[in-house]
Image (tube, grey):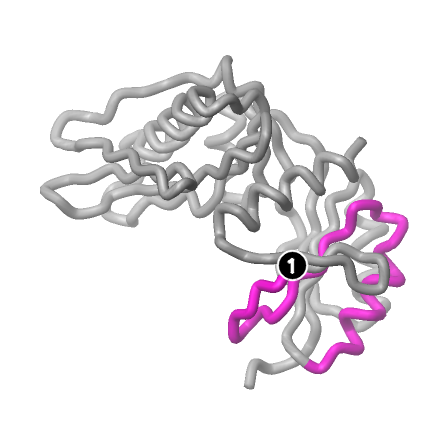
Amino acid sequence: MIGELVERWHRGWIAADGLTSRYRDGYLVVDVNRSRRKYEWIATDDAETAAMARIVAATEEPNWLSVPTHSPLKVTAEIEAAGLIVARPDETFMRCALAEHPHFDAPAGYAVEVTRNPVIGVRVLKDGEQAASGLMAVVGEDAVAHRIETADAHRRRGLGSVVMGTLAHEAVKDGAKTGLLFSSTDGVHLYRKLGWEKISDLVVARNDVTPG
């Protein structure tokens, strides 16, 4: 079950970020092609962690490994034993029934802008400047949230809820039923408040290669 959800999430992520993916040595690999992360290997079964970690550790470019799991301590031990560095030990894989997602109006003085390109983009603006933003890619009946951000000067004003609520509302218009996301530690509280539920823990690691 978790493997299917991971693959569905990954399809939305690469759509949202304009990336491509493929299977390499039988494992799912996303071509991120950035200076600090050339490829991201994604485990669809945490039983593959040790084998995948060894492969990633042996690569010569900066590569990352993401492992959704119900056993984060075991996965962390296997990752470290292979020589990888755990970069994000306590992220969370989450989902939500989008039809039930709450929707919020922007606070006084703020305006909401929605674009489709075809990825849904939401920006919350104040005096023409971006205060918060986010993306959501709809793939079939799934919608994957990506790059949910609030500028430091505009935090604690409910703008993250405005962004997420608007994204969910727009995704439902496009036929989406299930929301999926990988959440940072900081984002979990917001998403839980909005009705998102935990699917699994998520351990993210990288190899010990300095970007060229």
Residue in front for this viewpoint, 176 or 34: 176
Residue 150 in percent (x, y) is at 33, 44
Q: Measured along the vertical axis of the image, is residue 26 above or below residue 209? A: above
Residue 191 in percent (x, y) is at 50, 30
- Mark 1, Cα crowd under 10 Å, few <14 / some 14-19 / many 20+, is many
Name the residue tied to disc 1.
Answer: 30
187 relative to 24 in the view: left or right: left
42 within the magenta span: yes
Element at label 1: strand
Residue type (three-letter) at the residue carrying disc 1: Val
Tell me the magenta residue range. 31-60
Residue in front for this viewpoint, 190 or 142: 142
Name the residue rendered at 56%, 50% in the picture: 14
55 within the magenta span: yes
107 relative to 21 in the view: left or right: left
The image quarter containing residue 142 is top right
Q: Measured along the vertical axis of the image, is residue 147 above or below residue 108? A: below
